[in-house]
Amino acid sequence: MFDYLTVAPQYLIPKQALTLLAGRVARAQGGAFTSRLIAWFVQRYNVTMAEAANPDLTSYATFNDFFTRALKPGVRPLARAELICPVDGAISQFGRIQGQQIFQAKGHHYSSTALLGGDAVLAAQFDNGHFATLYLSPRDYHRIHMPCDGRLLRMIYVPGDLFSVNPTTACGVPGLFARNERVVCVFSGAQGPFVLVLVGATIVGSMATVWHGIINNPRAGKLCQWRYDVQSVCLKQGQEMGRFLLGSTVVMLFPDAALQFNATWQPGGAIRLGQAMASACPTTAT
């Protein structure tokens, strides 16, 4: 009941209008106003600017430039693992997909078909597979990197709501990640297909990928799909694949295979880009 009462106001506020306004402010070259806004944000959310390639707050022309800032080379070394963590943030949930049901929070599941924009054929490739849901808070680094080598096959923009995606909302809004606006990126890798889903949220001005640029600005309000059968987009493990212009969540899907997540992982635990996320379990010869 507490979770419902906490998130109930989100059903009433004009989330689309608020997000459009925030996007305009974040894109504006506001001079001194922009610098003051960035300074306030850094103090409010305790942002670690010492890791930024450019720590000078006054040098960012827009808030988006600051928010999608690059890191200094070498501050996120890549672990030697089949799958590395693609973002800085916190673990929301991870584990097995039960049939097509993905665990969101206590009492809440959603289907992989719903998450992937209703594409049942695509979703079936991940039946009884594995998932990981990673939350990026306002203070985090907001570029998204590849968990492993991959070749892009498809990208799908799925329109939807713009609820907040913080842990409280995840506990209080049924099917949150399958009802919010999102961008589904389908890849082929050494272990088979895998998906990275960039989930939008309240005040997330837009989402972008390195091969397409900004995807949802202005918001089309309809499902859109791009195929990359001819255009070759191949990304290496650890390479940037996209970014959030204001924070949100990444959901990853992997097929049914012998996969073991990092033994130190726990829901709510902090994570950093480049850390070991999972490895393939060795199979026993018969």
Image (cartoon, grey):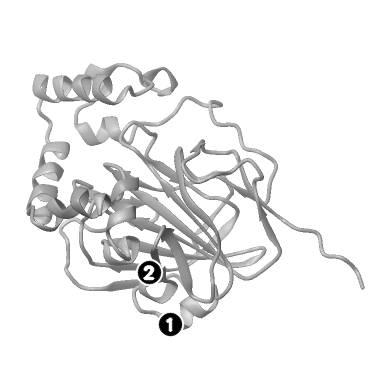
- Residue 27 position (above or below residue 16): above
Query: Residue 20, image x and y in percent?
Result: 11, 50
Q: Residue at x 9, y 48 (%)?
A: 18
Q: Residue at x 21, y 32 (%)?
A: 63
Q: Secondary structure at mark 1?
A: helix
Q: Residues within 10 Å of mark 1 (few under 14, many from 20)?
A: some
Which kind of residue does numbered mark 2 sit on?
Leu
Q: Residue at x 33, y 73 (%)?
A: 225
Residue matched to label 1:
120
Q: Between disc 2 and disc 1, whose residue precedes?
A: 2
- Residue 39 position (above or below residue 79): above
- Residue 76 position (above or below residue 165): above
Q: Residue at x 39, y 55 (%)?
A: 211
Could you tell whether 173 is left or right of 235 in the image?
A: left
Q: Quadrant of residue 178?
A: bottom left
Of 186 and 88, nearer the camera is 88
Q: CA distance from mark 2 to mark 1?
A: 10 Å
Q: Quadrant of residue 115?
A: bottom left
Residue matched to label 2:
115
Q: Quadrant of residue 21?
A: top left
